[in-house]
Amino acid sequence: MAEVTGAETEFDGAGRSLADLVRGARHVLFDFDGPICRLFAGRPAPVIAREQVDWLDAQGLGEVLTPAERTDGDPHSALRSLGLQRPDSDLVIEMEKRLTEQELKAVRSAWPTEHADPLIRTWSAVGARLAITTNNSPEAARRYLEGRGLAPCFEPHIYGRTHDLRLLKPDPYCLNLALRALGAAPAAALMIGDAPTDLLAARAAGVPFLGYARNERKAVPLREAGARHVISSLETLLTILRGP
């Protein structure tokens, strides 16, 4: 077990340390791709994102994307842009379907995030109720969890992308769904995510946020967005949960 550093005693804007947040969480909302696994480990996300852009170009809709969106390595970027600009288009449904198919294929080669499985089982065992709140396909998340034997820790609380792409995070829609279904007070919950959109959704829902970043490149945007707590290993949380 790794030694816990001073990160657990750093405080957020409400005066809570990381240890306070973790031990006080009665409901934990996990983002999926990142904190639980690397969904696109077998086929990198930027490759799929590029295919999304190429598909839009082939439909004659490349102009809906900004230059930044065209080079964004997030597969949701082009999809979100199309969905916001043409919410009633059949092309939105087709593009979302194509991404779902890619995500379902990716489940077979996804890499578990280190310490995620024991963390999930431990948190569930000590009485916390867990949910998935993701921009990925909920079916992809469900299949992955079933394959790891983790589905009983979450079911039926798996909330993900719908055809209404205006509801993707940073909109708090999936978080609010989870909170209502769990009967959870936002202040008694904790959102774990790896992107600024997760942080913004948590803020909008009134839920404390914990950032996970497997490297400094991922950590910088979270800190710049205002995340008070960012960890590089889930073992930190395991240590807190298993501590005295």
Image (tube, rainbow, N blue to C red):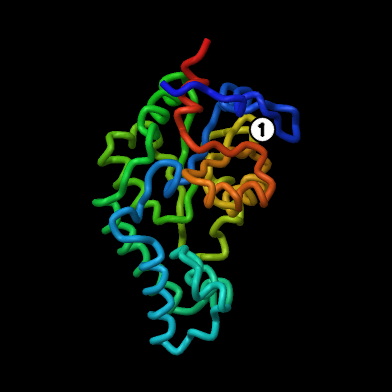
Eyeballing the image, is 163 above or below 228?
A: below
| Residue located farthest toward the top when viewing the structure as drawn | 244
* Residue 32 falls left or right of residue 29: left
Eyeballing the image, is 58 above or below 70?
A: below
Q: Secondary structure at mark 1?
A: helix
Residue closer to the observer: 198 or 180: 198
What amino acid is labelled 1 in the image? Ala
**Residue for point 51% across, 44% down:** 213
* Residue 180 image position (x, y, % from top left): 57, 40
* Residue 76 image position (x, y, % from top left): 47, 64
Residue closer to the observer: 13 or 121: 13
Total numbered circles: 1
| Residue located farthest toward the bottom when viewing the structure as drawn | 60
**Residue for point 46% across, 33% down:** 234
Residue closer to the observer: 180 or 20: 20
**Residue for point 50% across, 27% down:** 237
**Residue for point 34% across, 32% down:** 152
* Residue 146 falls left or right of residue 92: left
Q: Is residue 34 visible?
A: yes
Q: Is residue 178 visible?
A: no
Which part of the image, by quadrant, shows the N terminus? top left
What residue sits right under mark 1 in the picture? 187
Alpha-carbon neighbours of circle 1 within 10 Å: few (<14), some, or many (≥20)? Answer: some
* Residue 219 image position (x, y, % from top left): 56, 47
* Residue 64 falls left or right of residue 137: right
* Residue 223 image position (x, y, % from top left): 64, 47
Dividing the picture into quadrants, the one containing residue 119 is top left
